[in-house]
Image (tube, rainbow, N blue to C red):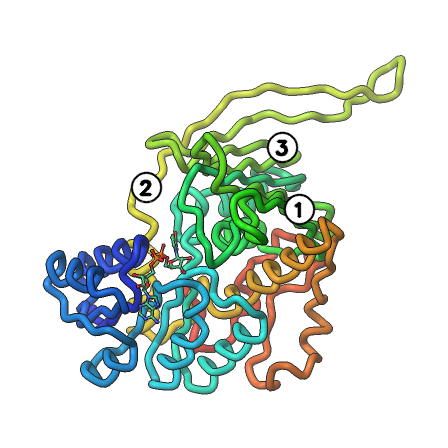
Amino acid sequence: MAQVKVGVVGLGAWGRNVARCLHELNECDLVACCDTNPASRALAELNWNVKTCETLDEMLERYPSIQAIVISSPAITHYPLAKKALLADKDVFVEKPFTLEVAHAEELLHLSEVRDRVLMVGHLMEYHPAVNYIRDLVRSGELGDIYYVYTQRVNLGRIRGDENALWSFAPHDISQILYMLGGTPTDVSARGQSFIQKSIEDVVFLSLYFSNRVMAHIHISWLDPHKVRSTTIVGSKKMVVFDDAATSEKLRIYDSRAEMHPTTSYGEATQVRFGDIHIPRISSTEPLKIEFQHFLDCVVRRLRPRSDAYDGLQVVRILDSAQRSLDMDGIPVALQPEEERLHAPSLPSKNRSWRPAPDVPISLPAFAYMPELSQKVPQ
Ligand SMILES: NC(=O)c1ccc[n+]([C@@H]2O[C@H](COP(=O)([O-])OP(=O)(O)OC[C@H]3O[C@@H](n4cnc5c(N)ncnc54)[C@H](O)[C@@H]3O)[C@@H](O)[C@H]2O)c1
């Protein structure tokens, strides 16, 4: 595979991980990195012997051979930097959250289509081997009908001053849930509190409701004594627990369920089954590597990424609705149905292909809607 010439924007706590990963990939030629902080630039020069610049403008000017820009700077910079990179005709990877406003996500999506650029959003969980294993279980029907899902992403950790815990953490959980279930929520509600800084929620409890009665609950916090990264899925046949903080045996599949059984005397009675617990072998490949390999592959083969700009927009729409609910102390906020959005004037008609409407079964392949870039990405 040809090497893709890449430039990275933002070399902070996460950006260093991003640059390290790209530096290690054979498919990537890490041409340059930029960061407004001189100490971060010095570290990158030392670690990866890479050229550095202060700004994206400077990097675009000095290294015109760069084909793809990876944006790992703070969330508020994502929209202007991604727009600049797309207007310079670069393929673009943007870390989560894609943007902080729905209109900005729509604009970037449109721009990428008009200019025929790859635009991928860093929804890392969609590249996690365990999440893909669960997705296959859901789609094969092995879990039965999905009843509900809940996730916990909590620790005592990096308390951000520029975004709340919802926008910082929930893109992971929302994208993971949509990817595993393949559907779209009809409405969301969120409650949370700001304890440490005024108006920046440290803890949020977010609920998503789907029209097929599936519920998902997301608990996020950077003010918690435990480091927990877990997902539980309850189906009519089996249940699954995914513990991403565990070093091994991250996935457990419980052959457990509750059922109604006919009885002679009382009509029907509930019966609970506690069956075997299966621990499948899951690849330990770093999800970040899989994610960037996919991005580079999409750049070379001109494919639409799995976590494309539609995916990013969908998550931003949910975050935006959740924020409105949070501001109203938990009052549910309905998401505009897909059919209405299809006829909304905010996007030009070209390439307007949305995810399945909310009332389609969640077993429907999530990528059935995929239109251009040129062909469907193999799953
Ligand atoms: N995918 C994941 O698992 C994951 C994990 C953590 C963070 N993130 C995301 O990565 C991004 C960066 O997070 P972080 O924790 O590294 O933040 P950070 O604050 O530690 O680092 C941001 C860096 O960007 C630089 N910067 C700011 N504005 C810039 C600009 N205009 N041009 C160039 N550089 C600029 C800063 O100097 C800093 O070095 C955020 O969007 C965050 O949400 C993703």
Residue 348: where, in percent of width, then height? 60, 86
* Residue 206 or residue 369, whichever sits in front: 206
Question: Would you name the residue on which mark 3 appears?
Answer: 237
Q: Which mark is residue 88?
A: none
User: Between disc 2 and disc 1, whose residue precedes?
Assistant: 1
Residue at horizontal 46%, vertical 55%?
Answer: 161
Residue at horizontal 56%, vertical 20%?
Answer: 275
Question: Would you name the residue on which mark 2 appears?
Answer: 283
Quarter containing ligand 1? Answer: bottom left
Left or right position of 300 against 80: left
* Residue 239 or residue 91, whichever sits in front: 91
Q: Quadrant of residue 264?
A: top right
Residue type at numbered disc 2: Ser
Q: Is residue 272 visible?
A: yes
Question: Would you name the residue on which mark 1 appears?
Answer: 191
The secondary element bearing badge 3 is classed as loop
